[in-house]
């Protein structure tokens, strides 16, 4: 089972949802970079459970411990090891249904591939693993900021409610993490309504990357959009992805879909900041379809490990909508990918490199 991601800026995560803890090793971080426990904890606090009525009631403080690779507030160039201990795991609800496959989860596929699965919250397939990515992503975000690259994500849809504006200062001011304050309450009502029915809802998270230099990515098999797509689809809840105009491109003529240019540069950004697999200097804009949380308190048809039909109602603590907590995860995976692409570009274009990078 591979648990590593990246080429030069590389992470390896470990641990299970209901084990002793989870963690990550980050390799390839340049030496001499300022990083603090607070930088990492700030991002983890955005992802942690129990923040509001919009999230699972599991009470994990997600306090991170830095084990290696940082000395006197600076990265040493050695692998950075981080640990997050599980404090509030409750496996009792899962013990009751360990013989059943939960609809929408990886139980069936994991069992058939490995002939063994950790039924406690899904083990490695649990969304809890994403805390490791957020911890690593905090370091990537810090690295990118030093290069003038910034990343911001927000919820742009929950069920049938769509955001119509993008006000980044508003994202952390509402529990659904939307950049449109005018629809925040309506989005929250959709989540609360689903909760009352013992159900869940999905939505869309948009991510924007600002300040990328021209030329990140490789033209053929390691296109920047292909790298970002791999990163986003590695998040278990993501079921669709578009860049720029996305599927709307199919209904446009070439003259309508192209981004014209003049002496000042691009006149539009329908391509979403990537041309021919390479960043073009415009903001990278991508949208991820986030599925409704699979664990719902409603009876569904399923199968037992012995192949018998059964009815299953999943009990326990689950997010009625994963979009708000997916926002920092999306930012983290975007940061890890762009940081990796930046370091790869530095090997080809020394002008990108400065200091110890």
Image (tube, rainbow, N blue to C red):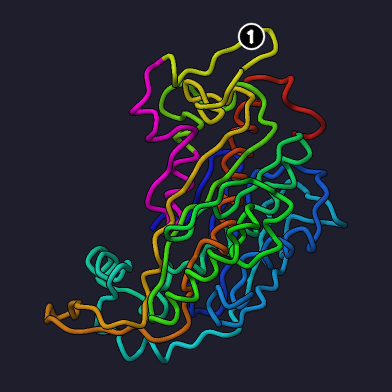
Q: Position of residue 145 (x, y in %)?
A: 76, 41
Q: Position of residue 295 (x, y in %)?
A: 37, 75
Q: Quadrant of residue 197?
A: bottom left
Q: Residues within 10 Å of mark 1 (few under 14, many from 20)?
A: few
Which residue shows up at 69% across the image and 48% down it? 167
The C terminus, quarter of image: top right
Which residue shows up at 74% across the image and 55% down it? 69
Along the line of sight, the residue nearer the viewer: 27 or 94:
94
User: Which residue extends farthest right?
Assistant: 72
Q: Position of residue 128 (x, y in %)?
A: 51, 69
Disc 1: which residue = 262
Secondary structure at numbered mark 1:
strand
Which residue shows up at 34% across the image and 28% down it? 250
Q: Residues in magenta?
A: 228-254
Reply yes or no: does residue 252 show up in magenta.
yes
On screen, residue 219 above or below 21: above
């Amino acid at each position: 089972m591979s648990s590593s991601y990246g080429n030069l800026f590389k992470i390896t995560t470990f641990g299970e949802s209901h084990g002793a803890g989870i963690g990550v090793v980050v390799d390839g971080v340049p030496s001499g970079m300022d990083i603090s426990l607070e930088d990492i904890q700030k991002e983890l606090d955005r992802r942690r459970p129990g923040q509001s009525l919009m999230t699972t009631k599991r009470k994990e403080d997600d306090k991170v411990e830095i084990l290696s690779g940082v000395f006197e507030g600076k990265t040493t160039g050695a692998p950075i090891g981080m640990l997050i201990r599980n404090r509030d795991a409750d496996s009792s609800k899962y013990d009751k249904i360990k013989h059943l496959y939960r609809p929408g989860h990886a139980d069936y596929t994991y069992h058939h591939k490995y002939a063994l699965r950790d039924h406690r919250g899904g083990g490695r397939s649990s969304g809890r693993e994403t805390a490791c990515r957020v911890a690593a992503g905090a370091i990537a975000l810090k690295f990118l900021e030093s290069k003038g690259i910034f990343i911001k994500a927000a919820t742009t849809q929950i069920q049938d409610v769509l955001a119509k504006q993008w006000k980044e200062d508003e994202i952390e001011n509402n529990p659904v993490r939307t950049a449109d304050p005018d629809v925040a309450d309506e989005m929250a009502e959709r989540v609360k309504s689903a909760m009352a029915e013992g159900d869940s809802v999905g939505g869309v998270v948009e991510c924007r990357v600002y300040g990328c230099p021209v030329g990140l990515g490789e033209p053929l098999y390691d296109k920047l959009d292909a790298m970002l797509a791999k990163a986003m689809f590695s998040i278990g809840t993501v079921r669709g992805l578009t860049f720029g105009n996305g599927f709307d491109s199919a209904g446009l003529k070439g003259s309508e879909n192209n981004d014209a240019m003049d002496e000042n540069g691009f006149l539009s950004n329908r391509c979403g900041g990537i041309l021919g697999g390479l960043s073009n200097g415009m903001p990278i804009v991508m949208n991820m379809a986030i599925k409704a949380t699979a664990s719902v308190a409603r009876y569904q048809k399923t199968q037992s490990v012995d192949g018998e039909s059964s009815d299953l109602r999943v009990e326990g603590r689950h997010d009625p909508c994963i979009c708000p907590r997916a926002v920092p995860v999306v930012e983290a995976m975007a940061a890890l990918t762009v940081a990796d692409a930046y370091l790869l570009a530095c090997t080809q274009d020394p002008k990108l490199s400065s200091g110890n990078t």
